[in-house]
């Protein structure tokens, strides 16, 4: 059984980005979106027009400074490899408790269609949040170019403005 990470959030977070479950490389590095082929961090730095860095502490600081929380829908699952399609026997994170602890969260962004699907299956939706589905930042999602993904992910910046 694989375990997810604790959430990254601050008392001022207004946006929550939800993935499904960390992949193998992320688990090994103990970092969200740790695989070099994943475009998540590049997207975040480009959205906020900041120079890209590999420093994980700087990456986390970029999110918290911009009122963004990060977590995964699942707390545990069985999975061979990193593909979401291989997830089974999943256990969700306690998002209801998370929302109680972080009442400033108003917007929930799913970092993939699969994250949205798992959320709806295990959590449902709450009227106090606005929900958005973004294209997966995974390098395996080659159906959209980076520039198309960036344009769609920029909705976060428009929400925060």
Image (spheres, rainbow, N blue to C red):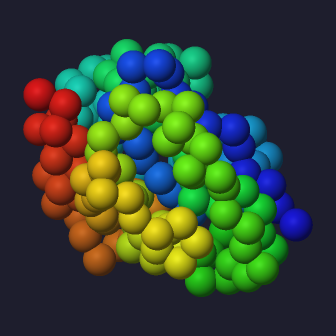
Q: Position of residue 19 (x, y in %)?
A: 51, 57
Q: Closer to the camera, 8 or 50?
A: 8
Q: In which quarter of the image is the C terminus?
A: top left
Query: Is 25 placed above or below 118 here?
Result: above
Q: Which residue is drawn at 74% across and 39% down?
A: 30
Q: Position of residue 110 (x, y in %)?
A: 39, 59
Q: Quadrant of the N terminus?
A: bottom right
In the image, taking residue 101 as reference, residue 13 lies left or right, namely left
Q: How many marks?
A: 0
Q: Closer to the camera, 142 or 93?
A: 93
Q: Position of residue 32 (x, y in %)?
A: 60, 42
Is any atom of residue 55 visible in this view? no
Is any atom of residue 124 visible in this view? yes
Quadrant in which residue 50 is drawn: top left
Q: Residue at x 72, y 51 (%)?
A: 4
Quadrant in which residue 71 is drawn: top right
Q: Which residue is drawn at 68% across and 82% down?
A: 86
Q: Closer to the camera, 95 or 158?
A: 95
Q: Closer to the camera, 109 or 43?
A: 109
Query: Is 37 placed above or below 29 here?
Result: below
Q: Where is residue 18 in the image (x, y as percent from the top left)?
A: 47, 53
Q: Which residue lies furthest to the right in this view?
A: 1
Q: Which residue is drawn at 65% across and 52% down?
A: 94
């Amino acid at each position: 059984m694989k375990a997810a990470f604790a959430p990254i959030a601050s008392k001022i977070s207004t946006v929550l980005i939800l993935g499904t479950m960390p992949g193998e490389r992320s688990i090994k590095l103990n970092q969200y979106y740790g695989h070099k082929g994943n475009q998540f961090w590049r997207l975040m730095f480009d959205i906020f027009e900041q120079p890209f860095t590999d420093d994980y502490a700087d990456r986390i600081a970029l999110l918290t400074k911009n009122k963004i929380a990060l977590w995964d829908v699942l707390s545990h699952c069985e999975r061979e490899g990193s593909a979401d399609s291989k997830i089974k026997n999943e256990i969700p994170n306690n998002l209801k408790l998370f929302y109680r602890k972080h009442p400033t969260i108003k917007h929930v962004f799913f970092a993939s269609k699969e994250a949205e699907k798992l959320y709806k299956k295990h959590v449902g939706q709450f009227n106090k949040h606005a929900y958005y589905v973004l294209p997966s930042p995974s390098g395996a999602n080659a159906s959209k170019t980076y520039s198309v993904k960036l344009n769609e992910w920029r909705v976060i910046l428009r929400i925060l403005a």
